[in-house]
Amino acid sequence: MSELITRTARLAPYAKRPRRASGFVTAYTYEPMPDESTSDLGNLFVVIEIISSGRMAEEVADLVIETVGQHYYNLDLDVEKTHLERFETAIKATNAELSRYIDRGNAAWV
């Protein structure tokens, strides 16, 4: 599966974007081990393209990956949530984190 993610990350910068625009693309995968308490939640695959380059683009990608992972796999938040509810919570938390990141003056990547 990691080969699929790598290939997707290579393709992403070329889809529907002018050649002169710079960008940052990364791929991330998390596969819990069978003995981990989160193994029943499945694997997380993330491919992110940010149409700007530089350190800020890398920070945004890391922020997205960390926030999604923390909120989806955190068993302390709400044990009763379904997979879909966990994913929705993770996406909402990610949007909130990105908003706070922009509010701190980091809007060049938008």
Image (spheres, rainbow, N blue to C red):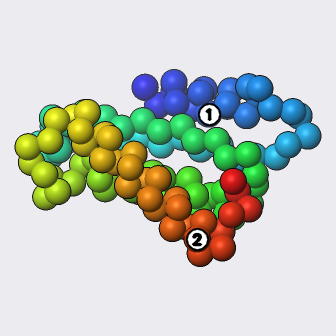
In the depicted view, which residue is nearer to us: 25 or 51? 51
Position of 27 compared to 80: left or right? right
Q: Which residue is the site of mark 2?
A: 103
Foreground of the two, 63 or 31? 63
- Amino acid under disc 2: Asp
Q: Quadrant of residue 41?
A: top left
> Where's the N terminus, which quadrant?
top left
> The residue tagged with tag 2: helix, strand or loop?
helix
Residue 9, labelled with which disc?
A: 1
Image spot of residue 19 (x, y percent): 88, 34
Regarding residue 68, the answer to whether it shows in the image is: no
At x 31% / y 35%, what residue is drawn? 43
Q: Closer to the N terminus: mark 1 or mark 2? A: 1
Q: Residue at x 91, y 40 (%)?
A: 20
Reply above or below: 81 against 57: above
Q: SS for tag 1? A: helix
| Amino acid type assigned to the residue bearing label 1 in the image | Ala
Give the CA separation, mark 1 to mark 2: 29 Å
What residue is at 56 percent from the left and 53 percent from the top? 61
Give the quadrant of the C terminus: bottom right
* Residue 68: x %, y % from top left: 38, 49
Q: Which mark is residue 18?
A: none
Q: Nearer the viewer, residue 99 or 19?
A: 99
Q: Is residue 84 visible?
A: yes
Report the mark closest to the observer, 1 or 2.
Answer: 2
Residue extending furthest toward the left: 80
Give me the residue at 54% from left, 37% from top. Answer: 47
- Circle 1/circle 2 CB separation < 8 Å: no
